[in-house]
Image (spheres, rainbow, N blue to C red):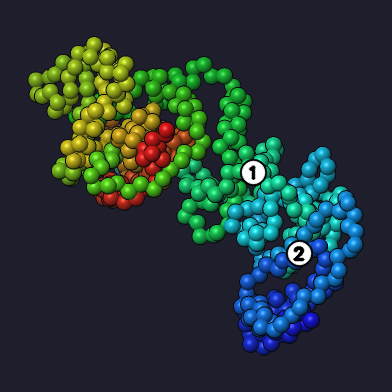
Amino acid sequence: QVLTDVLEEVRRSLHQDIDGAHMIHSLLNAPWLQSLLKLVGHVNVAIVSMSQAVLSAHDSVAQKDYEPVLPALPEELPDDEEASRIVCLVKNKQPLGATIKRNELTGEIFVARVIHGGLADRSGLLHAGDRIMEVNGFVVDGMEPEQVIQVVACSQGTIMFKVVPITERSVHSQTMLDPAIPCPDAGVSFTKGDVLEIVDQTDALWWQAKRLPCSSSCAGLVPSMALLKRKQREFWWSQPYQPHACIHTCKSGFRRSLRLCRRRFHSSVQPSCQAQCLSSYCYSALCSPYEEVVRYQRNPQDSLRLVALLGASGVGVNELRRRLIDMNPQLFHGAIPHTSRSPRDYEEPGREYHFVSRDVFENMIHSNKFLEYGEFKGNYYGTSSESVTEVLNSGKICVIDIEPSALQAVRTPELRAYVVYIKPPSAEQLRQTRHSSQILTNYYATRPFKEEDFTELEDSARKLELHFSQFFDHVIINEDLQESCAQLLSAATRAQEQPQWVPTCWIRPPP
Ligand SMILES: Nc1ncnc2c1ncn2[C@@H]1O[C@H](COP(=O)(O)OP(=O)(O)OP(=O)(O)O)[C@@H](O)[C@H]1O
């Protein structure tokens, strides 16, 4: 009687063109529902679809007085009969939002996980660990999980599951040992530097996450930290042993001005071979495949953030830094480096350099005072973190150029570096814009760019991006100098004024 009345109400909704009425009408007329209602016993029926039609049907029907007429429960239920539940989901063109697996020992098909925000999750009716007995009337016993998925994928409108609900819902119930993605369709594609909102970490190998910014309420699968570390280890061990990997890196290097020790007033120095070794740096960077981040808005009373420029040698890092400081010396300043060499006639201590003895410099090295340091023609040169803080404490934005090896040293709670990557423009634009520019050579002289300079620059830029793009807060394509300078100015000020993603440990130091 209830069904007849509901059907009648929905039929009337059809004429009023109420959204979803057609769907509800066909749903209620479905043969499986008719046969199901005959079976109503120790079975729960859940219909998941909120539409105006069903609501209005509900409202009208609810006003009538019904006595539920349920068939009497059988006198004796067989002992081995497990309490099953019928779950009906209305697909609405969305995927199910759950992955299905087979227990290799028992052969049972079960829900491996429920995707956060997906159809199954929102229904609240399917849970990880629920054993699936039937899908749309097909007994799944003996079927491959792929075949079950096929049945689900092919079903139009409504999917009916007969499940044995999991009794003890443990957080480990979803844990699989198979590192292959359980459902490729549910994977979230992301790349280094993307921000993911992790919404579920119960599975040891596959977390659920949304890539930000995200408009969908539905999460997807991403490899867990443990799985990524495992893959990294496997990759690491699969690489041929390279005892002299750092020699190669030092030769090619990234920045000519660093290889040359320092240039004009502000440049940094050649980092030591050990510090510059890309492979050793990569290893430490790779130790943590994910970095926990928070949105950080600098308080006006907090010190200013360091702006660290990174780019392949010759791309224009020094040029941009110099122009930025020259344009606005009240706001921007470079850090004064230290050196162990004696001052020249025109140099004043603390203006071009902080002049210190070799012993003092070595002491500073051992006390980890330098962001970068190196030796050139028997003299040490280095940029200390203190000289950066000095500028920041004076109320100016400190702008320095760094090698990748200094990334870790500047990404600290004290300096909170905002890393700007200076990227070369397209091959054609690079050659066109630099046709009358001078490059600084390894012999500290300048000459016009040659083709080999361009190819080396492009190669270095590719390597930098490949290994370190996750640390770039902002990227400037240095095509037109003036335009790049304007972009740098706005990025450097934005870093101080607008909220940015920063490592959580900068804000909340680990306990
Ligand atoms: N957008 C540009 N258009 C034309 N010339 C440019 C542009 N950017 C930089 N240059 C010129 O390219 C040359 C190299 O730039 P710069 O010295 O800043 O390189 P760098 O990245 O600091 O590398 P290095 O550390 O090896 O000196 C300079 O002569 C500079 O004026």
Q: CA distance from mark 2 to mark 1?
A: 25 Å
**Residue 411, percent across and down?**
36, 34
Query: 463 and 2: which one is in front?
Result: 2
Q: Is residue 269 left or right of residue 61?
A: left
What element does badge 1 sit on? helix
Residue in view at x 60 percent, y 48 percent: 221
The residue tagged 1 is 171
Amino acid at the residue labelled 2: Asn
Q: Local crowd at mark 2 within 10 Å, few (<14), some, or many (≥20)?
A: few
Of the two numbered discs 2 and 1 on the same chain, state the one appearing first in sequence. Answer: 2
Classify 224 as above or below 73: above
**Residue 422, percent across and down?**
35, 41
Query: 272 and 264: which one is in front?
Result: 272
**Residue 162, percent across and down?**
79, 59
The image's mark for residue 299 is none
Q: Quadrant of residue 177?
A: top right
Of all residues shown, which one is farthest toward the left? 345
The image's mark for residue 44 is 2
Splitting the image into four quadrants, where does ligand 1 fall? top left
